Amino acid sequence: MIRKIDKRIGILTAGGDCPGINAAIRGVAKTAILEYGMNIVGISNGYTGLINKEYFDIQESDISGILTLGGTILGTSREKPFKKGILQNEINKPKLIKDHYHHAKLDGLVCIGGNGTMRTAALLAQEGMNIIGIPKTIDNDVWGTDVTFGFDSAVNIATEAIDRLHTTANSHKRIMIIEVMGHHAGWIALYSGVAGGGDIILLPEIPFDEKIICKYLDHRAQIKKAYSIVVVAEGIDKPKKVKAGDYIAKMISDNLDYETRVTVLGYLQRGGTPSPTDRILATRYGAHAVDLIAEENFGQMVCILNNKTASIDLSEVQDKTRLIPEEHSLIKKARRIGTCFGDLMP
Ligand code: F6P
């Protein structure tokens, strides 16, 4: 039985894409249409779609079959409408967004994205628009939630890559470096590094000492460990234009005489079908977002806290990044099994 709530809801997806976005769009749209009888409007290419008046009605049939699909059927962009700049001053983008939100006769807007998207969402909420945020990113660094969808899929992909590097590293007795995504936070490196049995894991959150890294790699060779795997987050401390993996490889080859190879996993981490965990998480987020709209509890980001669906004020999330705490239990456990984080000899 439909509990008819007469509302017209916009959905947009902004920032870098990740597996699970379509599952979240489906979660929002199906709950809104089937449970509440709401109307859904898809906005193209993130906030750009509201600036350029690119939106269209979505029927339930339009979102059939998208649960397993990677990317986003709505398109995305990294448009930051509140960013000040010479050209930006010429057009008042926040005003256009508000005007077109009213033109589309929206009663609410669901913004699916990462930190940048949540910042814009918070500012739009402060301008009086009815906003709900849904956190997504492979980086898992959105403040205010225990987990974002996209992360589990990325960890699966990175772990499989590390598994494959083990066999080739062993055959050639090499040091294999794998660079994974994560500019500010090293969640992918930590989880895939532990899951894939990385010998050294380098995170933006833990300053490393090159002498420790080389000493540990040399020690492994001395005790007849045939090869070593080094998992590096792209955001480690290094000179600006150099890639993290290359930087570590050069550091090793300047000091040691072992064959070293670098693999940069790149956008493979963001593409393709979402893992079952991400499909479920995105569906939970989507349904909860619509419940908040039905209650008219706007200005919130849906979140997971201790495996329970909840929500947090967007103003609390704004301008924060969820980094790995130094004392994270997985770091402590990994240290106990001999994993080196570049700061201490195991
Ligand atoms: O979505 C987050 C992220 O994947 C980062 O880890 C990465 O550095 C960044 O996006 C790069 O994305 P783009 O090239 O699309 O800006």
Image (cartoon, rainbow, N blue to C red):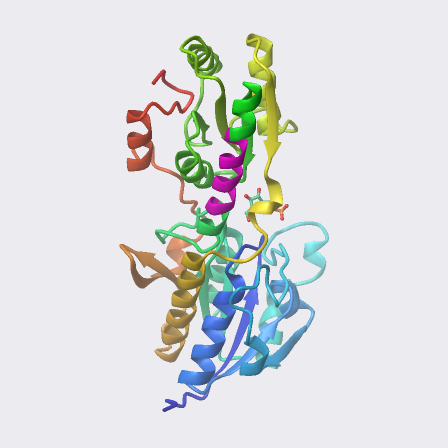
Picture coordinates of residue 31, whole percent (x, y): 43, 78
Q: Is residue 257 left or right of residue 192?
A: right
* Quarter of the view holding residue 100: bottom right
Query: Which residue does the image show at 47% across and 31% down from the upper left?
Result: 204
> Of residues 111 and 256, which is closer to you in this image?
256
Q: Quadrant of the image for the N terminus?
A: bottom left
Image check: 144 left or right of 65?
A: left
The answer to whether residue 244 shows anywhere in this view is: yes
* Towards the viewer: 98 or 6: 6
Residue 161 falls inside the magenta stretch: yes
Q: Residue at position x 50%, y 29% from top? A: 166
- Seen in the picture, residue 228 relative to 231 is either above or below; the reply is above
Q: Position of residue 249 (x, y in %)?
A: 59, 20
Secondary structure mostly seen in magenta is helix
Would residue 299 be visible to someone looking at this image? Answer: no
Where is 240 relative to 260, above or below? below
Q: In the figure, residue 283 lies in which quadrant?
A: bottom left
Q: Per the image, is 196 magenta?
A: no
Vertical arrangement, residue 219 with respect to residue 102, above or below? above
Q: Nearer the viewer, residue 200 or 176?
A: 176
x and y, in percent, of residue 135 in the image: 45, 58
* Residue 330 sits in quarter: top left
The quarter of the image holding the C terminus is top left
Q: Residue at x 61, y 63 (%)?
A: 46
**How many callouts does the rendering have?**
0
Q: Which residues are magenta?
A: 155-166
